[in-house]
Each structure stands twice: as structure tokens, then as C-alpha cells.
């Protein structure tokens, strides 16, 4: 589990590196989009905890990560 | 009997042959026509002209079944059989009192009717069963149901004896157990009810203690249907028990008594008893803050919140922004709560145009002009919308409300829809039943949609146009109410919520008024707007609705 967690962290950091910083810095302050980002982050956070407890798959973790990053760039 | 005796003359001795028909050929114009086909091997014939057909085989004679009364069984029961009963909670006294017999590995349960043995059902320890041949079908312990106000019916003799053991002497058992689940119960199978008709009719209460498996429930349903559900009660067994004998063995006499005394009336189709929904109502009571969800505008929150399993009707004069507002509600619900939607929006075909409008609303940016959305952002937004919005219906097809419900059902199964939008009603192809007018049709379909929303825990919005509206005294369009929707007053009566979207434009102000006319569950979804609508500002270029802030008007000349 320890090794798997390390891999997740690496994947997470690598994916963060690829994110368009300009888009994040200029993200919309629309109320709905702020809610969307917050909700996606919380869902991603939950699935990571679940993954560590062997209750979620890597695919689910990756899907929530993509969903969260996509909303951060809007 | 031969063919000649029936007037049929054939040449061959086997195979198929055609000949003249003794019934119709003599009187026919074409008397030479060999219209009678005869199958010599099978001994059957058929006339293709007059339809006369018959057979050489003797008709099977129906044997009159003579009902026989068996001899009472021998009651000298060995100790090991008594022990077998005691293992199942049945005492020696009950076994002796019920005159149960034993003979060569078979335990015999005598069926007494009017003091005489009319049938014997026998079983072995390994559950092999048999009954007396040509015996009368009647309830086991028939004499004990006579004149009883309450009769308890079980599925087997051991269950009946379990209840007798606990003091319920008014217990009988069906003679043949339960019919298999899913089979159509024949009248013959239930012929034992005939002899008991008088006693069952006179009883005030009939408690059905059938097994809790599928066959037992099937028997219970059929018995209750035949006896009359108004007097039938049923019992609920504790976890791990499927019949009364299980309860007696595992939980003892007190539990059996408790189960019988807690028997509850058989539910009547379409009637909900207080006890059926008691727990749900208490849940609701203990969670008073269960409210609908905000549509995203604080001005509307006190008048209209969105709850699952409801039907909202949205109307408004054409070009006043019904569809735009509906799209905005959908986008807000996606953003705020991640709701999944199915949407039929005929006025926004082709879908690519509609999608761009939704992307614009989602980002709060125009999708046309110089400051339009960039491709990258549009694609990212479309990926999000792809997860949450499914477009129902294509431009070329005629779409009915039934087809929309079918597609929504599949989408709900695959993606879990929370919202369904039908925009607008008049573009659907409406199929009236025979003799159905528009009012009846609207009533029927709204009932179907309301049931669909409840069953699938979905919120359904229907956008419907009003009839042709006259302008008001100021020559401005009048705000229509749901009673003005073309077709039927049922639009107002059968919906859970009713809203009009109306654009108020004058020299001094320009806002989209959300007139909430009806909210069925006001404790959780807000109160209707009375005269003053909830005001929203509509930004045409971005296609976005925002809370309306009234401008301060300073009178410079005062």
C-alpha cells in the first residue's frame, strides 16, 4: 500500500505539472464554477482516502483527478 | 365404428384420400367435387366445403370420480415418532388429540370433516408426501373452523399443529400446500374453499400464516383474493424463520403468540395505511431541514426550490425566455450539485447550436462576437457537460412523451438522471387514445409523468406555451398563468410546481420576472410569489441570468 500511495502522489504531481498555469491564474470567479471546483476537489479528496482503504480503484481516482483539474482550468 | 357407418366411402386402406362429403355433396351443384379429406391411418376427416369433421376414435368417456372415505389411521405411535414431533415443538398431547397415525415410516394426518375422516395426508421424515386416492378436498382440521370468528390458515399440517400447540385451536391448513410461484392457480387446486365457504364467509377475520417464500406469498395472495382482502390479515416472521413451525422451534410459544396477535390487515391495492409510512414520516419529522435545492439565484430561493420526484410546469409568452431560463436552471444544477439531466429541446435543434449556448452559459461568456470563448475552454467545458447532460430526440424523428420517458428510463439506468426537461410540449407528437379529448389526454399524460418522476426520483420540467394571449391595457403582454396553458386546467391542477417566466420591460426597468404560481410542498420548496415576481437580470450577450439589483433613481430636479 505504501508503494501504491507513492505512485499516486507521483502521478498527482506529474499531472499538476501539466496543468495550464495561466488558465488556473485566470480562472472564472463565477459562483457556480467555484462550487463546481470545490465539489470536484472534495470528491477527489474522498476517493483518495477510499483508495487508501482499498475501497476505490485507480481508475476512479484518476477520473476524479481529471474532473477536478478540468474544472480548475475554467 | 367404420368410415362406411359415417357415410364416407373410400377406396384405399391407408394414407390420405379425398372423397365426396355425405353431408353437403348430395345437395351441392358441384356434387362430384371431392371436398372431404380423409386420413385413413388416423381415422379423421374434414370437409373443406361445409366444415364437417369427425373421428373414428371413441370419445373418451368422463369417468365420474367416486369420492371415497379412507379408514381412520392407526394411532399407535412409537416413541421415536413422538420424539420427532417434540423436536419440532409439538407435544404428545397435541399429537394424540389430533389423532395423528403412524404406519411403516409414514406419519398420517387425518382430515376430519363433520366428525368423519374424509382424507389422509401422509408424510415421511424425509418430506415425501401422499394423500388418499379419490378423497374429498377440504381444509385440514376442518371441524375446528366451524363457527369461528377468527380463522387461521396455514400452508402445512406442521404449521397448523404449531399454532394448536400454542393454543390457537381455530387453525386450519390448506391440503395441498402452495402452488408454485408464478403459476396460474386453477380453481381445482382451490376446490377445498368450496366446502369451507360458509365458515369463511361468516368469519370476521382470517389470518393467513403461509410461508414467507415465493410460493407461500403466491398462496397468500390467491387466498386473500378469493376470501376477500377486507377481512384478511397477514403475519410477519422474524429473521431466519420461514413458517410458524420455524418460529416455534427457534423462538418458542411466546413469539408465536406475539406474531399472531400482531397480524396486520392485508394491504388493499392503492391504499396506503398510516403504519406503512409511519417510519418515513418520522424520518421527515426528525430532519426538518430537508429542503429543496437552490436554483442558483437568491431571489428565487424563497419562492422555488428543486426537490426530487416532482413535476414543474414552466410557461410564458413566446420569446420571453422560458427555454433560456430552463437552460440556465439546468446549468446551475450541474455546477452546484453535479446533477445529471436528460433534455428534449426541440426549439434548439440542431444540438450543436444548443451545446454552444450551454457552454456559453456554463462559462458565463458569449459564444459569438469578438470576445467569444476559446476552443480550449469550450472543449474542456464540453467534457464536463458530456458527463452531465444527455440530449434526447433527434431533429428528424417525431418524438412522443412515451418515447422520451423510455429514453429517460434507460439514461437513468445508465447514468442516474436527476432531472428531465421537455421543452416545449407542443413540439411533441401527441397520440390520443380512442375517444380521448385534449383535456383527458393532458390529464393522463401528466399523471404518467408525475408517477414517472416519483418512481425514478427525478425532477421533471415541462415547458408549455399558453394559448393566444390578449395584450393588457398598456398594450403589453399579460403574464400568463398555468390556467392559460393551451389544452387543460390540469396543467395547474396536476403539477407540483407552476412557474411563468415573463420579461418586464419598461423605460425604467428591464428584468426577467419569475412568477411562481404554485408550490405543492411549501414547507420545503418555498412559497409562491404573490404579485411581485422574483426578479432576475438577463445578460443577452452571455446568455446568463443574474440576481437583479435595482438601480437607485435620484431625482435631479427635487
Image (spheres, grey):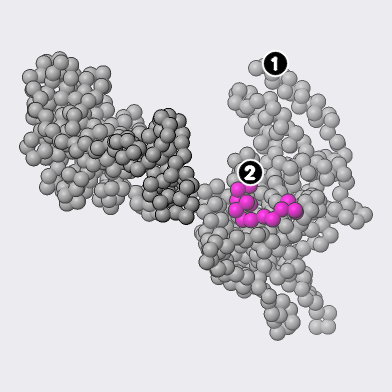
Quarter of the picture containing the N terminus of chain B is top left
Q: Crowdedness of circle 2 by 10 Å Cα count: few (<14), some, many (20+)? A: some
Chain part drawn in magenta: B394-407
Q: Position of residue B453 (x, y in %)?
A: 55, 52
Q: Position of residue B267 (x, y in %)?
A: 34, 49
> Considering depth in this image, is A41 or B304 the residue closer to the camera?
B304
Q: Mark 1 points at which residue?
A: A3
Asked if residue A70 lies in the magenta stretch, the reply is no
Q: Where on the picture, by quarter, is residue A43?
A: top right
Q: In the rendered structure, the residue with mark 1 lies on which chain? A: A
Residue B325 in sight here: no
Q: Where on the picture, by quarter, is residue B86?
A: top left
Q: Which residue extends farthest bottom? A: B473
Asked if residue B405 lies in the magenta stretch, the reply is yes
The CA span between labels 2 and 1 is: 39 Å
Q: Which residue is drawn at 74% across and 23% down?
A: A9
Q: Where is residue B185 in the image (x, y as percent from the top left)?
A: 33, 40
Any mark on residue B128, and which? none
Q: Mark 2 points at which residue?
A: B411
Q: In this view, does B289 lie above or below B74?
A: below
Q: Which residue is drawn at 64% across and 56% down?
A: B400
Amino acid at each position: 500500500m505504501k508503494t501504491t500511495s507513492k505512485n499516486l502522489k507521483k502521478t498527482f504531481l506529474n499531472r499538476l505539472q501539466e496543468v495550464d498555469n495561466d488558465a488556473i491564474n485566470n480562472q472564472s470567479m463565477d459562483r457556480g464554477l467555484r462550487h463546481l471546483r470545490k465539489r470536484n476537489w472534495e470528491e477527489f479528496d474522498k476517493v483518495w482516502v477510499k483508495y487508501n482503504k482499498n475501497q476505490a480503484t485507480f481508475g476512479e481516482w484518476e477520473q476524479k483527478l481529471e474532473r477536478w483539474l478540468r474544472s480548475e482550468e475554467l | 365404428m367404420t368410415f362406411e357407418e359415417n357415410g364416407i366411402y373410400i377406396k384405399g386402406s391407408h394414407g390420405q384420400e379425398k372423397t365426396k362429403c355425405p353431408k353437403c355433396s348430395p345437395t351441392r351443384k358441384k356434387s362430384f367435387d371431392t371436398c372431404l379429406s380423409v386420413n385413413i391411418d388416423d381415422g379423421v376427416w374434414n370437409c373443406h366445403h361445409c366444415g364437417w369433421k369427425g373421428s373414428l376414435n371413441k370419445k373418451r368417456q368422463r369417468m365420474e370420480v367416486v369420492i371415497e372415505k379412507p379408514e381412520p389411521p392407526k394411532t399407535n405411535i412409537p416413541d421415536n415418532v413422538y420424539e420427532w414431533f417434540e423436536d419440532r415443538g409439538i407435544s404428545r398431547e397435541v399429537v394424540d388429540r389430533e389423532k395423528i397415525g403412524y404406519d411403516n415410516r409414514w406419519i398420517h394426518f387425518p382430515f376430519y370433516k363433520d366428525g368423519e375422516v374424509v382424507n389422509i395426508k401422509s408424510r415421511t421424515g424425509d418430506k415425501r408426501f401422499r394423500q388418499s386416492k379419490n378423497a374429498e378436498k377440504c381444509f385440514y382440521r376442518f371441524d375446528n373452523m366451524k363457527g369461528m370468528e377468527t380463522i387461521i390458515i396455514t400452508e402445512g399440517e406442521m404449521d397448523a399443529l404449531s399454532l394448536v400447540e400454542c393454543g390457537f385451536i381455530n387453525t386450519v391448513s390448506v391440503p395441498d400446500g402452495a402452488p408454485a410461484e408464478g403459476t396460474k392457480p386453477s380453481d381445482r387446486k382451490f376446490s377445498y374453499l368450496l366446502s369451507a365457504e360458509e365458515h369463511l364467509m361468516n368469519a370476521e377475520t382470517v389470518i393467513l400464516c403461509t410461508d414467507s417464500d415465493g410460493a407461500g406469498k403466491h398462496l397468500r395472495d390467491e387466498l386473500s383474493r378469493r376470501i376477500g382482502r377486507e377481512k384478511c390479515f397477514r403475519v410477519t416472521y422474524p429473521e431466519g424463520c420461514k413458517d410458524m413451525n420455524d418460529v416455534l422451534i427457534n423462538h418458542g410459544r411466546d413469539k408465536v403468540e406475539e406474531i399472531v396477535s400482531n397480524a396486520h390487515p392485508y394491504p388493499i391495492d392503492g391504499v396506503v395505511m398510516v403504519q406503512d409510512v409511519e417510519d418515513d414520516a418520522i424520518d421527515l419529522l426528525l430532519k426538518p431541514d430537508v429542503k429543496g435545492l437552490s436554483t442558483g439565484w437568491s431571489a428565487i430561493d424563497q419562492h422555488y426550490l428543486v426537490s426530487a420526484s416532482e413535476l414543474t410546469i414552466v410557461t410564458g409568452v413566446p420569446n420571453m425566455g422560458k427555454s433560456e431560463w430552463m437552460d440556465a436552471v439546468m446549468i446551475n444544477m450541474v455546477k452546484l450539485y453535479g446533477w445529471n439531466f436528460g433534455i428534449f429541446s426541440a426549439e434548439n435543434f440542431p444540438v450543436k447550436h444548443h451545446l454552444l449556448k450551454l457552454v456559453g452559459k456554463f462559462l458565463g461568456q458569449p459564444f459569438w462576437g469578438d470576445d467569444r470563448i476559446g476552443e480550449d475552454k469550450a472543449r474542456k467545458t464540453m467534457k464536463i457537460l458530456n458527463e452531465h447532460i444527455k440530449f434526447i430526440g433527434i431533429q428528424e424523428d417525431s418524438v412522443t412523451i412515451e418515447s422520451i420517458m423510455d429514453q429517460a428510463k434507460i439514461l437513468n439506468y445508465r447514468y442516474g438522471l436527476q432531472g428531465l426537461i421537455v421543452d416545449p410540449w407542443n413540439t411533441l407528437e401527441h397520440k390520443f387514445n380512442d375517444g380521448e379529448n385534449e383535456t383527458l389526454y393532458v390529464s393522463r399524460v401528466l399523471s404518467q409523468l408525475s408517477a414517472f418522476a416519483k418512481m425514478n426520483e427525478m425532477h421533471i420540467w415541462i415547458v408549455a406555451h399558453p394559448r393566444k394571449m390578449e395584450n393588457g391595457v398598456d398594450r403589453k403582454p399579460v403574464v400568463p398563468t398555468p390556467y392559460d396553458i393551451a389544452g387543460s386546467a390540469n396543467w395547474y391542477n396536476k403539477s407540483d410546481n407552476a412557474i411563468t417566466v415573463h420579461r418586464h420591460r419598461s423605460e425604467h426597468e428591464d428584468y426577467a420576472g419569475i412568477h411562481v404560481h404554485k408550490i405543492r410542498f411549501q414547507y420545503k420548496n418555498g412559497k409562491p410569489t404573490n404579485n411581485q415576481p422574483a426578479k432576475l437580470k438577463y445578460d443577452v450577450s452571455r446568455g446568463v441570468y443574474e440576481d437583479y439589483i435595482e438601480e437607485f433613481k435620484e431625482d435631479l430636479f427635487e
